Amino acid sequence: MSKRGKKGKKQKKDNNISDESSEEGESNFENTKNKLLNTLNSESKNERESGYLEFSRHITNFIVPAFFSDLDGFLDSVKYSLKNGSQNEIQLCLSCLYLASFTIPEESLTLYSDVQKTLEKLIQIHESGEVRQMAIRSIGVLCFVVYYTQDSTEVAEKALQKMFGILQEDNLPAGENYYSYIAEFLQMCGLLLSIMPHTILSKELETDPELPGEYLFDYALSLFRNLMGHKSPHVRQCAATNIALLCNMKDIYDEEEDEELVCETVLDDVLVEMSQLEGEHSKKVSRKVKTQQRSVFRELIKSIEEQDYPEIEHNVSGNTIDIVQWQKVLQFNILKNCLQTGFQKHLEKNQLFSTVFDYVIKNKGFREKKSYKNQRKQFNKKQKNEREKKIFKERKKKYNRKDY
């Protein structure tokens, strides 16, 4: 038989193997999916918790919308866990909920509308600060994704005004256990503010005539200034970051609309307050916290005074994307915190992220080819082995020449 015949026979055999492996992969996927969905409906609390944990791992590291082919079943499991689950189960369920919006963004409005009332109830009455923190994150992320899929700020605007109502000093829960919850509130306020156009920021608030600000921008600024005096350094930094975000948006919109959202005297007062926090000398605050706070506030003051806004360069599939202005930097950091190790995967493969950060996803990822870093690593290893062999030979010759 000719070489060509052998090669053709071998190629045909390889094709058969690949078909079999793909069919096997599909059946394994279906089994995994069905097993996970059955686990979420289990009567055992421990099984449901492990199911949510495994589900979160899959949708964080693997963008597989087919996991949600039975969306109604998934939502029924979520609503049951939110109402009847333990604290740990509720936290895992909430994590799974907002991660799902990244995987199936087109269904984010359905996800939000089905659990909105339950999430708001958890924020108001649940005794755990951790559960409240995860609930407010779920609302913020879901409303953010809804904006990018529906091209409307209506849902985000309503959620933002409710957040502002809860963040008033009279409504804030007391105790150190709730500091992270308040900081999360501020971060989600910043996330939703970052997508608001000029028409919304300069809109009069009609819900409560006694609100201190006439416009949404004024009220947000006043609220964040009050929270800069909070006991928690983390809460102060989140509030100050949101003020820097508002100032960044003010500069952009003032140029576009040829009108000022806020007068310069107010910003001067804000800068004075930030300068006082930068040089805080309280004995109750540790040296490490003081140093960190000084660094953060120095950067924020510079950003507002000199309009020197942050920039991040990040590598996606061999290309560098530029994240500029406070709006995008804040979005980048929050989404990265939500996805943790799966963030890079979503940047490479998820169309939602390419829309948010305005870049084009390559069809071929950089992992399909050997990266320069791996080549350099192998080369260094080879050089090291050769050096070790050379040293060993020289030592062997040296000892062989010695007379004992």
Image (cartoon, rainbow, N blue to C red):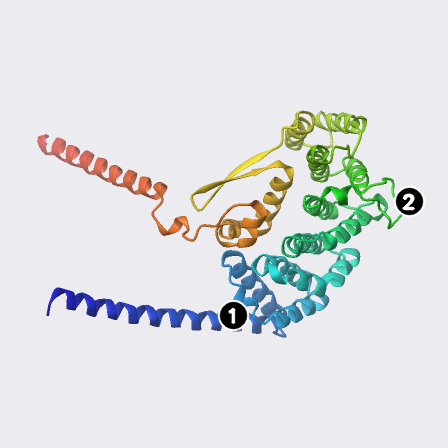
Residue 70 in the image: state x and y as whole percent.
59, 72
Q: Nearer the viewer, residue 160 or 77?
A: 160
Q: Nearer the viewer, residue 267 or 136?
A: 267
- Residue indicated by mark 1: 33
Q: Nearer the viewer, residue 181 or 366?
A: 366
Residue 173 can be seen, yes or no: no
Residue 89 in the image: state x and y as whole percent.
65, 63
The C terminus - image quarter: top left
Along the polypeptide, which appears first: circle 2 or circle 1? Answer: 1
Side of 387 where 313 appears, left or right? right
Identify which residue is drawn at 23% across, 37% down: 388
Residue 136 can be seen, yes or no: yes
- Residue indicated by mark 2: 210
The N terminus - image quarter: bottom left
Residue 294's image quarter?
A: top right
Name the residue type under label 2: Glu
- Considering every residue shown, the one lying at the far right of the view is 210
Residue 240 in the image: state x and y as whole percent.
72, 35
Secondary structure type for disc 1: helix
Q: Is residue 30 above or below residue 327?
A: below
Side of 161 where 278 appears, left or right? left
Identify which residue is drawn at 78% across, 40% down: 217
Q: Which mark is residue 205?
A: none
Q: Residues within 10 Å of mark 2 (few under 14, many from 20)?
A: few
Q: Nearer the viewer, residue 234 or 325?
A: 325
Name the residue type under label 1: Lys
Identify which residue is drawn at 86% across, 50% down: 207
Residue 83's image quarter?
A: bottom right
Q: Is residue 269 above or below residue 240?
A: above
Q: Is residue 327 above or below residue 367?
A: above
Identify which residue is drawn at 57% across, 74% down: 38
